[in-house]
Image (spheres, helix red, strand yellow):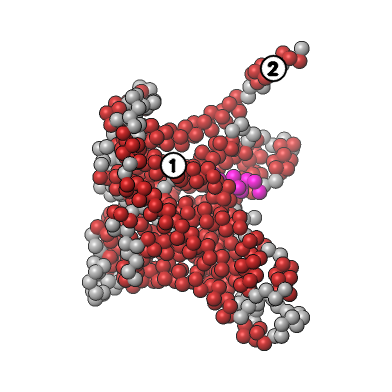
Amino acid sequence: MTATTAPPSSRTASFDPRRALLYAISIIVLLVIVVPLTFSLFGGFRSNAQLASDPVGLPDPWIWANYQSALTDANFYRQVGNSLVIALVTTLLVLPAASLAAFVLARYRFRGREAIYILFTLGLLFPVAVAILPLFITLRQTGLLNSPLGVAMPQAAFGLPLSIVILRPFFRSIPKDLEDAAVIDGCGAFRFYWSVMLPLSRPVLSTIAVLTVVGSWNAFLLPLLVLGQADQWTLPLGINNISTTYVTDTAAILAYTTLAMIPALVFYFIAQRQIVSGLTAGGVKG
Amino acid sequence: MTTTTAPTHETAVPRGSPPRRSGTAPWPVVLVFLLPALLLYALFVIYPIAQSIRFSAYDWNGLTPLTDWVGLQNFRDAFADPIFVQAISHNFIIIALSLLLQIPFAVALAVLLTRNLKGRGVFRTMYFAPFILSEVVTGVVWRQILRPNGLLDVMFGSVGADGLTREWLADPQIALYSLFFVLSWKYFGFHMVLILAGLQLIPTELEEAASIDGASWWQGFRYVTLPLLGPTIRVSVFLSIIGALQQFDLVWVTTEGGPVNSTATMATYLVDSAFRKSQFGYASAVSVIVFLMSLLVALFYQRFVLRRDLEGALTG
């Protein structure tokens, strides 16, 4: 008789309208997120006529030309390459600069320490947009316009506050005994930083690296103003350019945009944990 | 800050002599460690911000020598320009809508995701996904969805709701609200994840105790969970305000501040003045205004709202 309480019947027996409502809400929100993304994905497989007459549902017929022309466009790969280089350089600047600074700010007492820390935290308030004008002029004066470094260095500078705010409490939480032992072993400050602190903080450092890469990969305003020549453009500049140059060729725009969002989404699914923990670390503190 | 001994004396202390204050380091060592960060920060953050204060007092096109000192005239001009005043009001409308709609929505979804639903990991992952997409991708895709006869209108049409179709981004009356929807689409997941992290800090025993005492779910939420979630929500609100004050990328890509400036924000106004109209001095004044507003909000918030929450978090 126990066999009669098969899962389906037991499920209907415990049907809970409130639970159903919760599922309904979750799924509606999910659709609001997913529909624009799939619209873009499938839109790339339509012709512009299809997009105008029937943008809902599956493409009929499937048109490969849009993705094909994006994937054979040398500009696309150049932009991916440029975006990658700038993201890497930014990360390679942020990691050492932020970890060295956070290390002394966390482990040593010196006059002005809190003032310096507050100076860095204030930077959390000011993304690039506020300082973009004089920054542009500074870059022009230093000859960094039209150079990937002209994007990477300011990005790294604006990335310091969040990185230091994440790193300092972590460095602080490492027990003092470890440091004492290192000092007895004749470890100087740098050796201690390099051979003890850094290996211990690999998870936090990778979180910062991931956040920096994502921020750089998505950046728009700074590259827009700094990188004047089309062969230096990053992916967001490329998308923006296509979408404003070929305004009527919606299918081509969507194909290009979809291809550009794939690396970001793949990266997100791989590094989700780091991204979420890093972003919440600054905000939620007990 | 607590140490009063001059750092230089520290080197005179023989090594290993107890009790050694191993937490103090001589200035040169500290300086070497701080140097890369301070250099980057000074050159690309502090110096430009200081420069914009200087430029703001000149009538300047960005190229010629700085000679045309105008004092505070740029600031007066800015506040006398109805377009700029409108742009400020747009920033504040976005802030108000975010606080009234976006954050409560994020709280509701975060609470919903703490319920024992199947597939909640998938929901969480997907809700956060738009935050990872660039503003450019988001803006370009939504522009295609919201254009006349775009996906949204066709979807309305296919369920017989033709009457609901609008010029979502082209009608100055509603473009700002369409834009707010797109902003929420992109950013609510961030606030949701923040609040989820805050919810995890709340021991479940408390809600269980409330429910044993006969509290309804709503009472438990309202009188137990919500107050304990206060600190996280306040941080979320703060980040939302600061983000809205400086909103640029998504607006620029989606509407460029148009039609007829109906979606212009302070930041798009700033970039427009500087790089399209070559009014660098004037635009610098605008950036100083944005800067000061952010600073004021931050100080005010730090002083009156966050103080007890962030004690030790931001400053120690």
- The image shows residue B54 at horizontal and vertical percentages of 33, 73
Q: Position of residue B281 (x, y in %)?
A: 28, 67
- The three-letter amino acid code for the residue at tag 1 is Ile
Q: Main secondary structure of the magenta part?
A: helix
Q: Quadrant of residue A108?
A: bottom right
Label 2 marks a residue whose chain is: A
- Residue B165 at least partly seen: no
Secondary structure found at label 2: loop
Q: Is residue B104 left or right of residue B59?
A: right
Reading the image, the residue beneath label 2 is A6
Name the residue nearer the viewer: B222 or B125: B125
Q: Quadrant of the N terminus of chain B?
A: bottom right
The amino acid pointed to by label 2 is Ala
- Mark 1 or mark 2, which is nearer the start of the sequence? 2
Is residue A219 within the magenta segment? Answer: no
Give the residue drawn at x 57%, y 31%. A22
Q: CA distance from mark 2 to mark 1?
A: 42 Å
Q: Residue at 25%, 37% (x, y): give it.
A: A248
Tell me the residue at 77%/81% (across/down).
B18
Left or right of B295? Residue A244 is: left
Residue A109 lies left or right of residue A158; in this view the side is right
Does residue A11 show up? yes
What stretch of residues is rendered in magenta? B192-201
Say whether residue A260 is left or right of residue B126. left
Q: Chain of mark 1?
A: A
Res A262 label = 1
Residue A79 in percent (x, y) is at 36, 50
Residue B181, which numbered label? none
For disc 1, the neighbor class at 10 Å (few under 14, some 14 to 19, many from 20) is few
